[in-house]
Image: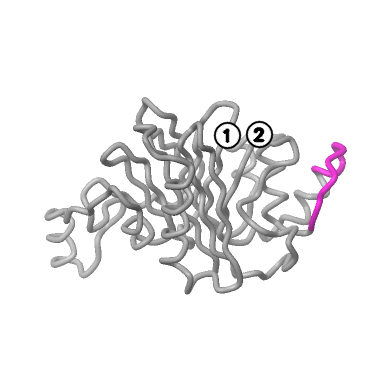
């Protein structure tokens, strides 16, 4: 199953130790999704931290561990899911001269993002997935979700933080943020017995909708594009 989480401290006040402890708390809240191992990555200067809980399936070695950094060092990914066509994509990338370190679909997607760009790579992917990708050169965060929304992903720009995670409880584990009930979402839950997307039960927190990409840079607003729809 696996789980992903992370945040950007937009105020720039958190130390490296605080970034790591918060990321570990977010990962620990979702241990049931990834019992095999965990991983943390942080960029102290940018105030970014990624957290991952792993259920090892495709490549169970250390070469498949996450967060994973691209061969060129520019991109960092945390990824939940499976790209069914990753062997095809791998062969295309190998034909350009790329040499892989392991056998995971995560590495294939990561090197695809580095070579083809995020939107173009996502359109090539066939599978179920949710991912977060940090572009260290542009200081840009990308979030993506599969075409049918099989894998969950929540996000929010609240209280000087940009938060994301596979479950809402991961966001609650981040220090410095107190969730506030969204009464309109609560009314929807009472009426429909669920909260319709993109709302969640918390004010300011959204579900990334199926078939969409989100791009975010500090100082701006999240930009959402639809790369696929059923029509």
Where residue 167 appears, x then y in whole percent? 39, 61
Q: Residues within 10 Å of mark 1 (few under 14, many from 20)?
A: some
Asked if residue 193 lies in the magenta stretch, the reply is no
Rendering coords of residue 203 (x, y %): 21, 49
Residue visible at 23% across and 52% down? 178
Which residue occupies the foreground of this view, 229 or 179? Answer: 179
Count up the numbered dots: 2
Judging depth in this view, the residue of 60 and 109 nearest the camera is: 60
- Taking the image as shown, residue 136 lies to the left or right of residue 156, namely right
Q: Which residue is found at the position 42% from the left and 47% from the top?
A: 18
Q: In the depicted view, which residue is nearer to us: 190 or 53? A: 53
Q: Is residue 17 above or below residue 186?
A: above
Residue 231 appears anywhere in the view: no
- The magenta segment is 93-102
Q: Which residue is mark 2?
A: 74
Q: Pointer 2: residues within 10 angstroms few (<14), some, or many (20+)?
A: some
- Marks 2 and 1: CB-CB under 8 Å? yes
Tell me what residue is drawn at x 59 percent, y 37 percent.
Answer: 118
Question: Which quadrant is the N terminus positioned in?
Answer: bottom right
Judging by the rendered image, the residue that carries numbered circle 1 is 135
For label 2, the SS is loop
157 relative to 62 in the view: left or right: left
Our reading of the magenta stretch's main secondary structure is: loop
């Amino acid at each position: 199953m696996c789980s992903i989480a992370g945040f950007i401290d937009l105020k720039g006040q958190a130390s490296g130790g605080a970034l790591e402890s918060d990321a570990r708390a977010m990962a620990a809240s979702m241990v049931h999704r990834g019992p095999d191992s965990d991983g943390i990555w942080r960029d102290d200067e940018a105030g970014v931290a990624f957290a991952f809980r792993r259920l090892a399936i495709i490549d169970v070695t250390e070469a498949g561990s996450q967060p994973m950094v691209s061969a060129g060092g520019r991109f960092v990914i945390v990824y939940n899911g499976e790209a069914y066509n990753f062997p095809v994509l791998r062969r295309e990338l190998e034909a350009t001269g790329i040499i892989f370190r392991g056998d995971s679909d995560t590495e294939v997607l990561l090197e695809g993002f580095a070579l083809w760009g995020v939107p173009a790579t996502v359109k090539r992917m066939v599978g179920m997935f949710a991912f977060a990708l940090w572009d260290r050169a542009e200081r840009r965060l990308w979030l993506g979700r599969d075409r049918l929304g099989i894998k969950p992903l929540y996000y929010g720009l609240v209280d000087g933080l940009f938060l994301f995670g596979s479950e809402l409880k991961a966001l609650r584990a981040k220090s410095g943020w107190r969730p506030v009930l969204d009464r309109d979402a609560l009314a929807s839950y009472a009426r429909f017995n669920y909260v319709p997307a993109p709302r969640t039960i918390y004010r300011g927190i959204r579900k990334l909708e199926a078939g969409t990409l989100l791009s975010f840079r500090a100082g701006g607003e999240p930009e959402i594009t639809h790369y696929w729809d059923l029509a």
